[in-house]
Amino acid sequence: MDITINKQLVQKDIKKEEQFTPVFKINNLNLWYGQDHALKDIKFDIPEKQVTAIIGPSGCGKSTFIKTLNRMVEMIPIVRMSGEIVYREKNIFDPKYGVEELRTQVGMVFQKPNPFPKSIYDNVAYGPRIHGIKNKKVLDEVVEKSLRGAAIWDEVKDRLNENAYGLSGGQQQRLCIARCLAIEPDVILMDEPTSALDPISTLKVEELVQELKKDYSIVIVTHNMQQAARISDRTAFFLNGEVVEYTDTSTLFSNPSDKRTEDYITGRFG
Amino acid sequence: MSRDKTNQKSIRSMIQENKSSRSQSAVMEKVVPKIFLICAIISIFTTLGIVFTLLTETFTFFNRVSIVEFFTNTRWFPFTADKNADYGILALVMGTLTVTAIAMVVAIPVGLAAAIYLSEYASAKTRKLIKPILEVLAGIPTIVYGFFALTFVTPLLDSIIPGGISIFNALSPGIVVGIMIIPMIASLSEDAMNAVPNSMREGAMALGATRFEVAMKVVLPAALSGVMASFVLGISRAIGETMIVTIAGGSRPTADINVTESIQTMTAYIVQVSQGDTGYGTTIYYSIYAVGMTLFVFTLIMNLLAQFISRKFREEY
Amino acid sequence: MSLINKESVKKRMGSRVAANGFAKFLFILATSFSLIVLGVLIYRILVDGLPYLSLDFITNFASRMPERAGIWAALLGTIWIMAVTAPVSFILGVGTAIYLEEYAKKNAFTKFVQVNIANLAGVPSIVFGLLGLTIFVRLAGLGSSVLAGGLTMSLLILPVIVVASQEAIRTVPKEIREASFGMGATKWQTIRRIVFPAALPGILTGTILALSRAVGETAPLLVLGALAYVAFVPENLFSQFTVLPIQLYNWTSRPQEDFHMLAASGIIILMIILLIMNSIAVYIRNKFHKRF
């Protein structure tokens, strides 16, 4: 009996997955920090122009996972990986695929707001500039559009030349989102982007994420289940480096198929 | 919105177009670290250059003067006819060690006391006032200290010491070298004492110990390796100090030390030769490298000793 | 019966507190000693030096007559030496620091470079003079020129600049490097546009302090064969030269009282130059202190 239900669910899952165009296909991804097996046989697809939330207790590998998608995880010297991540038909671990090119397409917003110690303008113009755009008029346009896109234009338009460190934490995080938008990425990765913010700033960022998914595919790691439920279309539940369950958000929260997912979302651990 | 869309396309495509310039930047990525590596290697070449220079010229010197004489003769009289010349490094080494000893007699107690005061007694406000003054003292050029030794300390000593003192002597530059080193010992020792965790102090204070007892019985023993290392570094500085001893110490090398009389240190001898009209290629010319080599070995041993002390006896809290 | 005799503890307490008070007095005395010496030193130099201090003193050349002697040649010599030392030591020092902090792998070679720099910092300055005399003056055939002097000084202060730059680079937080890499920036782009500008105040403070040390250095340049009596200003990198401290040494080592007063006047000028340099360094340090 149990088995049939599971089968049905699996079939339902497959049906759903057929409906979307995947932007990332992750196949048998394994990752080790030295001896520590941090990600185990991860296998799922991430949809285009939707919000995919990654949830799970601390230490479950969710932050590590999102950092594999733009290969930021390689900055830690003791990391080893196997398996493949296919982004738009290309394996990102292919030596011919430059890591800079990948990160130009796959932008990232970090846990703690991390603006550069430069002016607000220079922060946003940083990406276009390093990618060779020097035309002042184009840069002006990009800066305005990105700041509007990140819903912070009205707050900063009169002080674009002031240092970004003068902004509040919430403003800094939206500036970081604007900075990310400035190079028009395809995907935006967000690693617990609201964990350092107050509730009002968090709300603003959440609204922004809803807005951004019209144009961008978004992967968001969050320790906050309500946040995942509020803003995401699909949710993956990570536990001890494995994907326990991955399905559309409403199903995962209302009708989880795995006992461990149910225990987690009902607050029995984590 | 449609304008936005076209714009969006254009930024992304502009970045794509610029990919062609990527090959250029890829070259930079390869070349730049190599340039910086060369910078780092220059520091190694500097050391190699010092060792190579000193060794080869010292070797030439020992072709002319026996190495046995260099180490056993107690007289240093190079400025006479070649066969009468004496090259006994001991006379210069004694001059250097005398000045160093006097300097440490001044610098160690005063520097350590200042460090204890700053770390254990002084309020944050007092510390903020005194530390910059010590920094100023540490930043004064040695030529100024030399001037001070000759024109102030020597006359002062002459009036204090019964029987007077020569215009050039070991005592005055020794004291002034010590004064020069005080800030260094004070600041390094204070760093070591500051690293002692407050919980250790509080533990002793709670038992009713006075600040003095805490400083002497708890903090100083715990910070001993850092304090000792600062002394050794101070000795190294004193050995290598040049201008103060050149100006106020005189130029009479002797192994028979009287602190009120003129002496000559290794460094002062090198300056004396460079200032004279000794030709390139003479034995005297090469002698400054042999003296320099001796000086280098002395300071190197002191520096390695300081590193050894602070590593071997690193405090573990 | 109690193990501790409360009465005797109480009695001893008085002498312990007294010992503490006496020790504190001695410590304060020792600390004030440095301050008093500094005060006396400055007072003496002002008393001796102010009478000769005038505009003519700055713009005149050295002379055998004290009332006509000045520091013009020495002042310009110092500026010439700094014009060589500042860029050379800055480029080499910052380059080494960037290599060690950003590019070097943690291996034996890197450790060797690091230990070597620490040891180089402890080599007496006069030994650098011997190095310069052999390598730059003789082997490279530069003679006792501005270039030879400037290069020797660069090597002398190199370790100080490397260590200060390394410390400055280390204060740049990992997070903003990640932000840059996350946008597809290359390593060099990140260093040039993010790390270096962020570390620059610290690097500049360290460099200016190191240069101020070079301004006051006498011994290495004496050994190199810098002239003590110069009545001309350097015209190019290959000119002979003197510097301020050497001019002061020359005056100090003469027996006549008048020349000692000239030396004191020159010391005032030298100390003013150092004071200005140090103030700039402190200003930069305070202005950009703790931004992260």
Image (cartoon, grey):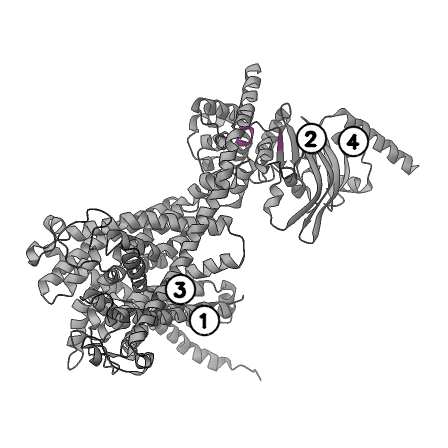
Number of residue marks: 4
Q: CA distance from mark 2 to mark 3?
A: 60 Å
Q: Counting other residues with Cα less than 10 Å from the Cα at mark 3, is it few (<14), some (14-19), or many (20 or more)?
A: many
Q: Residue at the location (11% across, 61% down)?
A: C259
Q: Which mark is residue A89?
A: 2
Q: Nearer the viewer, residue A141 or A164?
A: A141
Graded by Cα atoms within 10 Å as few (under 14), some (14 to 19) or many (20 or more), the crowding at tag 4 reads few
Q: Image quadrant of residue C121? A: bottom left
Q: Chain of mark 2?
A: A
Which-is-in-front pick, marks 4 and 3? Answer: 3
Marks 2 and 4 on same chain:
yes
Query: Mark 1 vs mark 3: same chain?
Result: yes
Q: Secondary structure at mark 2?
A: loop
- Left or right placement of residue A257 versus residue B16 in this view: right
**Which residue lies under the disc numbered 4?**
A251
Q: Chain of mark 4?
A: A
The disc labelled 1 sits on which kind of residue?
Answer: Leu
SS of the residue at dot 4? helix
